[in-house]
Amino acid sequence: MKQQKIGFMALAAMVVGSMIGGGAFNLPGAMAQKASAGPILIGWLITGIGMIMLALVFEHLANSKPELEGGIYAYAREGFGRFVGFNSAWGYWVSAWIGTVANITLVFNAISYFFPIFAADNRIFLLGMSAVVIWGLFWLVSSGIREAALVNLVTTIAKLVPILIFILLVAIAFNLKTFNLSFWGEGDALGSIFEQVKGTMLVTLWAFVGIEGAVVLSSRAKNRRDVGKATVTGLVGVLLVYILISVLSLGVMSQAELAGLKEPTMAYVLEATMGPAGATIIMIGLIISLSGALLGWTILASEISYLVAKDGAFPKLFAKTNKNGAPVGALLVTQIATQIVAGVALFSEQTYLVLSSIAGICALLPYLLSALYSVRWSKAESNRKMLIFSVIAAAYSLWLVYASGIWYIVIAALVYTPGIIAYMIAEREQSRGQMSRYEMIASLVLVALAAIAVYGIWSQEIQL
């Protein structure tokens, strides 16, 4: 079956559509819960530099190593071996469908604004509706990646309209005195400036997960050089939008008021400026946005696991395709996992912010490994400029690991541990024998950290 190819606009839409999901519409409150205006500006400066460097890393690797299909998996495998490559792909795959669950919970919140039956306490109904969403996405993506990518392009354009309306109206309502209230959070319960900046990191990380969307689909690009251009173009545009959303909101409502808003907080910021009509505009925009994000993440989750299975590092089931060339085996497993976690989340009342934070921390390893591989490759080709960019991207990724905190790291280990079984199945299917000594040691470390996570959650030392 001839593989379907997609162009620059669809690739750029995958980057923008994957990044601008529920995170954008919850930015004002999510940032305000962690910091006041001054530390938020510092946080965006750090994030902007780090993410631009990471985008340049992906662009450089896509252009200089076009033979490495699947991007984040192939870079980790090429630089650090098959087991590390597998874990990079596993973390990204899990991050994608946990993020899908987070977005499902938020879209139900938005719909409940119009139809109260979607309220969080109607769990059985929401479980049924989650099945409609999840398996509707299965049908759409199984119809063909190119067709699904084109639908994503349309929803990406549609979601930008209410966001740009929000930015315009909030800019008009912006009040400098409100913005300067408790600018550094002095005397507040937010902590020191350093702690506030650190607190914003997981929020901004999740907001940018999806930056690698074009890289993951590199094998389906009509022109491989479009992959890098789509990544950088999408990142710069989204970064500007995010900064305007979070910073301008602080000129409409105080940090404390923003922190106390219900999800999605953008709706209630606009409601404060123009009444119920403002919330209606944002809620409709959020529903459109999340529809595109759900589709984009379903594509990315199935595509990365399909490519890894083709390379023999995921079980063979993930490599099965249908007559449309869609990775139906990977898609089936992805949707089953999404459905299970959606059921757990709906009945345990996990918030969007918690789920998105877990998804974000799971995506950290692929980003860090990609940056570290770029350091090695830049040295090998004597590219001093890219070496500097790669070192900054790696340092930023390490800073995110530190800023996320020890408990989120052990939770990530809990997510990565089941992957050991999948890896062993793939090794047996490929007749590669037993795991090596270093693979066994790494696996034991993961199991130990996962055990700590289980104990922490059971003893309530870890508050999700």
Image: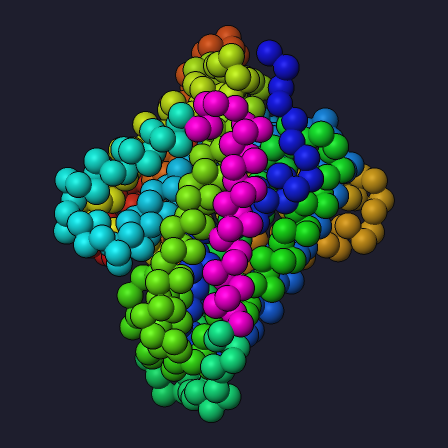
| Colour mode of the rendering | rainbow
Relative to 179, say whether 435 is above or below: above
| Residue 265 can be seen in this image | no
Name the outermost residue toward the front: 277
Write the residue at 17% across / 49% down: 117
Find the magenta span and give its range.
140-168
Query: Is 61 on the left-hand or right-hand side of 131?
Result: right
x and y percent of residue 142 in the render?
46, 23
Q: Residue at x 40, y 66 (%)?
A: 266
Vertical order, 144 against 210 (above or below) = above
Q: Quadrant of residue 214?
A: top right
Residue 85 location, x and y as percent? 56, 31
Residue 434 in percent (x, y) is at 47, 15
Asked if 216 appears above or below 289 in the picture, the reply is above
- Compared across the picture, whether 226 is left or right of 44 comes to right
**Magenta stretch: includes residue 151:** yes
Q: Residue at x 53, y 72 (%)?
A: 168
In this rendered view, identify the residue nearer to me: 423 or 246: 246
243 or 430, which lies in front? 243
Please tell me whether the stretch drawn in magenta is mainly helix, strand or loop.
helix
The N terminus lies in quadrant: top right
x%, y% of residue 359? 41, 46
Residue 214 left/right relative to 226: left
User: Looking at the image, how many numbered discs can be counted on the residues?
Assistant: 0
The residue lying toward the viewer, choosing from 337 and 458, is 337
